[in-house]
Image: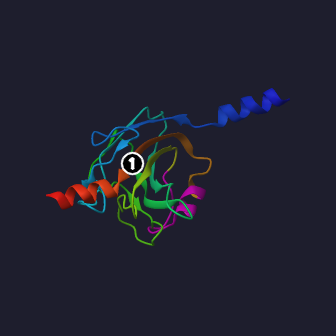
Amino acid sequence: MHIFTFLCALLLQPAPLTIISPDFENEGSIPSRFTCDGEDINPTIIVNGMPEGTKSLALIVEDPDAPLTTFTQWLVWNIPPGERIPENSIPGIQGINTVGKNPYRGPCPVAGAQRYSFKVYALNTILKLEQDADRSEVEKAMEGHILAMGELLGEYNRSVAVGEKNKK
């Protein structure tokens, strides 16, 4: 009985997407131009391994190291399926982030280094949500529609970036 449950759970897991960026390596340092200390624009995201039947993509950028709760930096859905989300773009419908705004908000830790996650979901549907939906509404709408998911991790150390900026 337990093996059956395990196999069912395994079959229900979304397939993995490969998410990369020409702007930084997975688990590497995010350049300051994509942060609050720079231009505060989104980096280029490349999505590989999209399954057949993908009708749209959703993107959640978050700071899992934020104090108290995971901070949602950017929330975008109904992104047309394609391999590239260009830098400094609004590729779909934007939802509201943790501070109640909808544009991209780049890494901006109070001090020190923090990790940031760029999660991309391949969906078998177009989400029927109003602009400015929040993360919980988007995640609820995605339930049962995720074909694949992938994640790109980066780190930003504001202390180092601000220190280098002040030396110039």
Q: Quadrant of the C terminus?
A: bottom left
| Residue 99 in view in this figure | yes
Q: Is residue 6 left or right of residue 96?
A: right
In the rendered structure, does residue 7 fall within the stretch colored magenta?
no
Quarter residue 152 falls in: top left
The image's colour scheme reads rainbow
- Residue displayed at 61% across by 51% down: 143
Q: Quadrant of the N terminus?
A: top right
Residue type of the residue flagged with mark 1: Glu
Q: Which residues are the magenta region?
A: 126-140
- Residue displayed at 20% across by 58% down: 165
Q: Is residue 131 above or below residue 14?
A: below
Q: Nearer the viewer, residue 42 or 164?
A: 164
Label total for image: 1
Quarter residue 9 falls in: top right
The residue tagged 1 is 155
